[in-house]
Image: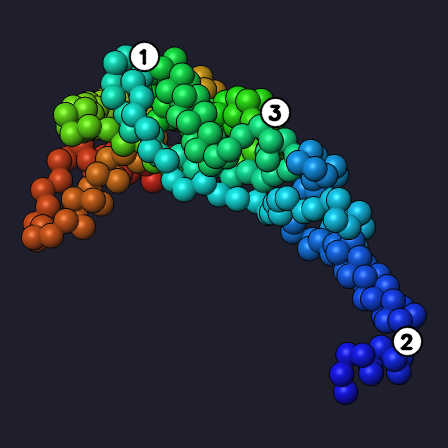
Amino acid sequence: MGIEQFLTQFGGGNILLLLLAAFIIICILAGVRIVPQSEKFVVERFGRLRAVLGPGINFIVPFLDRVAHKISVLERQLPAMSQDAITSDNVLVQVETSVFYRITEPEKTVYRIRDVDGAISTTVAGIVRSEIGRMELDQVQANRTGLILAIQEQLAAQVDEWGIEVTRAEILDVNLDAATRAAMLQQLNAERARRAQVTEAEGKKRAVELSADAELYAAEQIAKARRISADAEAYATGVVAKAIAANGLEAAQYQVALKQVEALSKLGESAGSNTILVPANALEAFGDAFKMLKGR
């Protein structure tokens, strides 16, 4: 079937309807934009910013508006950056950093900065050199948290006009040159040796103090024992004195006789004592003692 026969059969009106339907479908397809959750679309009209489309279904004017940029809003990590810096005590250090950020306002990022990663890297390098230049080496090693916070705050203030949010900054490593590292190692070894000597001296001092305390304690205990023994003897003497005062000379003689009897008993109990020589007055003492016992 030729074109003339087709036009004759369906008529010019039907063709126009078909063309109009096709145009409407094309306009609908061109005017509807579905934006993913992780992206934002920057729409231009005749080269000028028209709108920023968020996630979901969006509508634009076909043939007038166009999606010029599709920007991911996911968090991004810059590759690890390494820059040299000099501390306030003139030590050269090499600091390795990493920055995490995300784009919050695509219209600023698109029209105000060309190379986002490069701009952030340069800004971080300048901030790191500035902050480390105010610190001594010991502070850089011990105060990484404060340095990280300073980098993050200053970086966030500077990249805000680019529509970027800095979510996190990290200092991965702080490296020193070989000469500085060797000097620090010697200083560390010297400090360890000093601490060992101090610990040893304190141990000896403590040992001497404990020994002196032990001797003092022993002396105090001996003195207490002697005082108790003296008190006991004084008490016994007092008892004898009271007995003598109460009973007269007989009580004293009785005590002496008892002591002699006890001495002879111990002598008889000793090993190898087959023969015992007893003084004559001892017999008299025994007799006196027995008499006193009977009298009691």
Which SS class for mark 3? helix
Q: Mark 3: which amino acid? A: Glu
Q: Mark 2: which amino acid? A: Gly
Name the image colouring.
Answer: rainbow
Q: Mark 1: which amino acid? A: Ser
Q: Could you say which is closer to the camera, residue 257 or residue 192?
A: 192
Lateral position of residue 75 relative to residue 99, left or right: right
First in sequence: mark 2 vs mark 1: 2
> Mark 3 or mark 2: which is in front?
2
Residue 292 on image: x %, y %: 38, 35
Q: Are marks 1 and 3 in contact (CB under 8 Å)?
A: no
Residue at label 3? 161
Report the residue at 37% width, 35% height from top.
81
The answer to whether residue 269 is above or below residue 127 is below
First in sequence: mark 1 vs mark 3: 1
Disc 2 versus disc 1: distance between alpha carbons?
Answer: 90 Å
The image quadrant of residue 36 is bottom right
Residue at label 1? 88
Q: Could you say which is closer to the camera, residue 140 or residue 270?
A: 140
Q: For residue 11, which numbered disc appears in the image?
A: 2
- Quadrant location of the N terminus? bottom right
Residue 288 on image: x %, y %: 30, 34
Q: Residues within 10 Å of mark 1 (few under 14, many from 20)?
A: some
Disc 1 versus disc 3: distance between alpha carbons?
Answer: 31 Å
Q: Residues within 10 Å of mark 2 (few under 14, many from 20)?
A: few
